[in-house]
Structure formats: structure tokens, C-alpha cells
Image: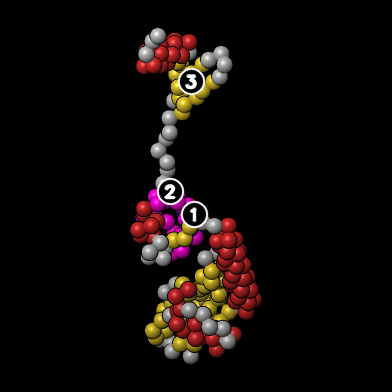
Amino acid sequence: MASPAATLSWTSSSWLNNRTLTRNASEGIKISDKSSAFVVLAQKKAKKTRKIILIEDVTDVGKKGQLLDVKAGFYRNFLHPSGKARIVTPVLLKEMKVEEERIEAEKKRVKEEALQLARIFETVGAFKVKRKGGKGKQIFGSVTAQDLVDIIKAQLQRDIDKRIVSLPEIRETGEYIAELKLHPEVSAQVRLNVFAN
């Protein structure tokens, strides 16, 4: 009678002799047998990233409201404690979409107001500017953007910022055209009649 170790050794070696080992392209080893199939796939390293939404601008990472995949440690150690990002959830995505729609509606409203104001400025005609006259067509001093802002406020009761006004240099009497940049996409042209007292 054979020993149990010899029997075990003989059984396992005969099992391996009856089966063939083949290597797959998918990094796995397949043992083929007439009775069963056994596939071993190599485990890949798990990706440790988190899908987040930035709550505020972060330099070298992204802008507010941007969806990003960042490493778990970066989120855990920097973004989350400083309150600069949150992990994406369906509720958070819905909130961000509502906020985005509100911002778009606000931008559209501001543009419409700028278009209405541009129509008002272009239908007014010319604004009259009086200056103390010198020799010939010369005037003392010049007409500035602040002068135009004051005239518009007096005639139309509209407050505008003098930084949106672009004027040519006005040192003589005559008719000039000033441009008002009311919105990044909307500008209005205003005529100025400069005459001496």
C-alpha cells in the first residue's frame, strides 16, 4: 500500500498532465479541460479617483462649477477640508443645473436691458454740449466722458458709468460720435453737437 503523500503527489501530477495551460491576450491564464473551464484574470490596480464639483476657482485645477476627476488623497487632504469641492451626487448635479439656468436667465435679462438702452440712445438724436469758445472753432478745455455722462443723466435720467464711454478727443466745435459699451455684445453710438457760447 502506498503512503498518503505518494498518492496525493501522484493524483495532483496526473491532474496537471490531463490539462493544458494556455495564455490569453486578456492577461489571463485559461486551463482547458474536457469537464470544466477555469479562467484566472490578473487583478489590476484599483483607480483611486473621486468625481467632484468645484465650489470655487482653484488655481491649476479648474473653475467654479466644473466637473473633475481628482485623486482621492487630493480631495480628502486639500479640497474637502478647505471647502473648495464636493463629491458629485445626483442631488448636487440637479442643484448645479438649476443654478446654471438661473445664471443664464440673468445674463439674458441683462443683455435685453442693454439692447433697450441702446435703442433709447440711438433714437434720442444728438446731445448738445456748450463750451466757452476761443479763436475760430477752438473751445477752451475739452469734452470728456464725464461731461457726456452728466448730460445723459440730466436729459434721460439714466446713470451710466464713465468707463463704458469712448470718445474721440474733442477740442473744437462740431459733431462727434461717441460709443457706449453697454454689454460685451451690445454697444450704442451717440451723437454729440459741440458748440461755443
Which residue is at the front of the view, 143 or 155?
155
* Residue drawn at (53%, 83%) of the image: 159
On the image, which quarter does residue 46 sit in? top left
Residue receiving disc 3: 30
Q: In this view, does 58 lie above or below 24?
A: below
* Residue drawn at (39%, 56%) of the image: 75
Question: Disc 3 vs disc 1: which is toward the camera?
Answer: 3
**Residue type, numbered disc 2:** Thr
**Residue type, numbered disc 3:** Lys
Q: Is residue 60 above or below residue 35?
A: below
Question: Disc 2 vs disc 1: which is toward the camera?
Answer: 2
Q: Earlier in the sequence, mark 2 or mark 3?
A: 3
- Distance between the alpha carbons at the discs numbered 2 and 3: 32 Å
Can you give x and y, in whole percent of width and height, for residue 1 in the image? 40, 9
Label 2, secondary structure: give it.
strand
The magenta segment: 50-72
Residue receiving disc 2: 49
Is 61 one of the magenta-colored residues?
yes
Residue receiving disc 1: 67
**Residue type, numbered disc 1:** Leu
* Residue drawn at (45%, 24%) of the image: 28
Label 3, secondary structure: give it.
strand
